Image (tube, rainbow, N blue to C red):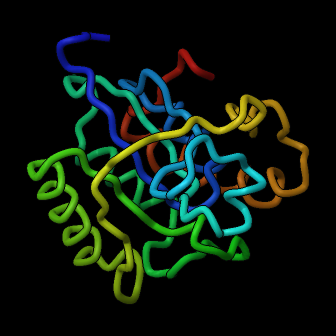
Amino acid sequence: MDKNNVQQITFGGGCFWCVESCFNMLKGVESAISGYSGGHKDNPTYEEVCTGETGHAEVVQITYDSSVISYEQLMDVFFFLHDPTQLNRQGNDIGTQYRSVIYYKDEAEKAKAEKAIKASQESGRWPGTYVTELTQFEKFWPAEQYHQGYYNENPTQPYCSAVVGPKIQKFKKHFGELGMLNTDSQ
């Protein structure tokens, strides 16, 4: 990875187990780490975030090489992996912690995120109005260690086999043809 091109982006698209697993497969992604952002409590725990009372979203913070994979490609994957028209939920995962959100670091990144939202909405991929929040990035709290790489460690866990596994297969089918899969993390 060329350190001169290293960038970070943080966003939430429902359960971080689904999102993290897919982003870690992409060529050019150094890491995708599950965690929490957007809340009002320092060092929140998973149990606290699940109550919805801390204001945090389950997010993934992605460190990537922008000379290998672009911000726009990451946004395309982001909007592929979750339904941005569902307010505070993804399927049966309900609560503000599952909201669709992009955390931007500066006005240039905010403008790129606005453009990505508009392009995805105009593509018609998801019928309805997008409810993806754009929020100024403040802090990222890594989730507990057992959440990192959760699907890879627990593929037969009921939620993983029913929800995460099929989403990963759909992702691989769609993005693998583009040559974006990172075979080093397989």
Q: Is residue 152 visible?
A: yes
Residue 42 percent across, percent down from the top left:
56, 44
Residue 114 percent across, percent down from the top left:
18, 65
Residue at position x 54%, y 15% from top?
A: 184
Q: Is residue 84 left or right of residue 152?
A: left
Residue 126 location, quadrant: bottom left
Residue 88 location, quadrant: bottom right
Residue at position x 58%, y 20% from top?
A: 185
Which quadrant of the rendered structure holds the C terminus? top right
Residue 128 location, quadrant: bottom left
24 relative to 10, above or below: above
Q: Is residue 169 visible?
A: no
Furthest residue in direction front, as rendered: 41
73 or 60: which is nearer to us? 60
90 or 49: which is nearer to us? 49
41 relative to 69, above or below: below
Q: Is residue 65 left or right of residue 60?
A: left
Residue at position x 28%, y 76% from top?
A: 121
Residue 67 percent across, percent down from the top left:
19, 23
Which quadrant of the rendered structure holds the N terminus? top left
Residue 179 percent across, percent down from the top left:
39, 32
